[in-house]
Amino acid sequence: MDPIVLNLVGLAAMFVLLAMGMPIGFAMGVIGTAGSFLLIGVEPSLSLLGLTVFETVITNDLSVVPLFVLMGFFATRSGLSESLYRSCNTWLGHRRGGLALATIGGSGAFAAICGSSLATAATMSQVALPEMRRYRYDERLATGAIAAGGTIGILIPPSVILVLYGILTESDIGQLFAAGIVPGVLTVVVFMATISIVTSLNPELGPPGARASTRQMIAAIKDVWATIVLFLLVIGGIYTGAFTPTEAAGIGAMGAFDLAVNTWTRDAPPKRKRLLRAANLLLVGSLLALSVAVAVNLATGAEASDWPDWVGYPVYAGIVLAHAVYVWLGLSAKAELGSCLLETTKTTAMIFTILIGAILLNKFLTLGGLAAALGTSVEDLGAGPLVTIAVILLIYFVLGCALDALAMILLTIPIFFPIVQQLGFDPIWFGVIVVMVVELGLITPPVGMNVFIIKGMAPDVPLSRIYSGVLPFVVAEVLLIVLLVAVPELATWLPGTME
């Protein structure tokens, strides 16, 4: 059989396996291994399978995945979503549709330390939905805002989806994170504008709440300053070159753990609370000293981390001592800590299974020549680059109605990325575009994973009304994607300043 025909038959067989209920990672792995067996023989294909599994698991770059996943679970379990939502509600709740605006703002802030759309949607459902119901918000606006806000979780860094895209395409993960910031902020702004428009057309959808005092607004900032510092530390460190994305993931996970410990010990005995306050002061002082050293280095043109030992050693000692206290206090909350570690293990195993399957499928398609043939076919068609991108995005939109975000990225990138490279598009820009289209798939029928999360949290709300509520946000997201295609600098400008 012709290798390209075998590739096409293999893809068709994979979708049959998916329709039969086989998990996406196993379906891709089975087809990739079986196809390689038919192309290169039994022993080489089995060797390829073993090497792929081994090399994927021990790859240092992939250590960023479980660390960012752990960071997300610590953030979820520590109640940060509640603090972020309350803070946004204090500032925006008095406006028409203010609770929905606060939901979008809280989702964007939580996404900055979580990186998971499903986790963002689930946690914000628990926090925001009861409050919007208490103020008699229309269930379409309430559920639609939560579902749409959850999609921001995979765009604003740190994003596991961007990490996997960077690994598959050998793109710089730090630049991908930087590229997601401006589109992520734009998404928050446009979603808020969408809420303002629909509530101005129909004020009964989201009645305004009580206006907070200036003192309450200032107090609200105090509740979230640590979260803001954590985000700036992780992203700022990558941007300035102070540490790599993998190091940033470790710092982010530890920072989220610190915030979680502060939450878990709220009801602890007075002695433990005093010890926690001392550790907090020690850590803040050490980080301030470190920040000053980095700022001085950057101002003088030196490397960001090129500080003298007399600065480094005391700072390191303070950080280590503070975290020794956090770890001891965290171990006293065994149930919460154990749950975070267990869920991280499960999620990481799932991601790695899908990733290994995608790599095996990618090698099968490469051996068969399908990706190269598609690139040649695109050239032969003579269609313009933008027309080709439009077709690819349309395919993503259709796939998003049936596949989850992670599976869609890992399944399609091996096929489409060579075409994008051949057309000369920036891989960083394409990565952000793909993530935004995947975002759209999270709230479109018939799958719409975020919609099903909301349905699980609000079983009394008909699915049709939830989809009706997300429709304005779908339109807004489409307009954002068109804007990013027309003005690629929105994604490429910030990464360009890192070079």
Image: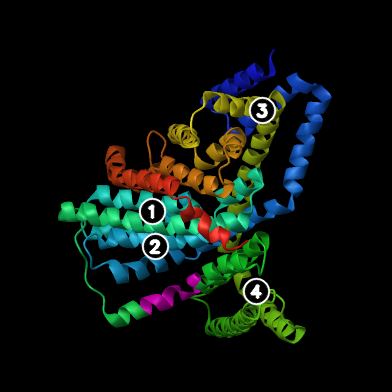
226 is within the stretch colored magenta: yes
Three-letter code for the amino acid on which mark 3 is drawn:
Leu
Quadrant that contains the N terminus: top right
Secondary structure at badge 3 equals helix
**Tag shown at residue 365:** 3
Q: Residues within 10 Å of mark 4 (few under 14, many from 20)?
A: few
Q: Nearer the viewer, mark 3 or mark 4?
A: 3
Where does the image place residue 200, in percent across and percent down from the top left?
18, 56
Q: Earlier in the sequence, mark 1 or mark 4?
A: 1
Q: Nearer the viewer, mark 2 or mark 3?
A: 3
Where does the image place residue 392, in percent across and percent down from the top left?
49, 34
Q: Nearer the viewer, mark 1 or mark 3?
A: 3
Look at mark 2 in the image and give the residue it sits on. 106
Three-letter code for the amino acid on which mark 1 is drawn:
Gly
Three-letter code for the amino acid on which mark 4 is drawn:
Trp
Three-letter code for the amino acid on which mark 2 is drawn:
Gly
Q: CA distance from mark 1 to mark 3?
A: 36 Å
86 is within the stretch colored magenta: no
Secondary structure at badge 1 equals helix
Look at the image and give the residue range highlighted in magenta. 219-228
Q: Residue at x 66, y 33 (%)?
A: 362
Q: Judge left or right: residue 331 versus residue 86.
A: right
**Tag shown at residue 328:** 4
Please tell me which residue lies in front, 164 or 466.
164
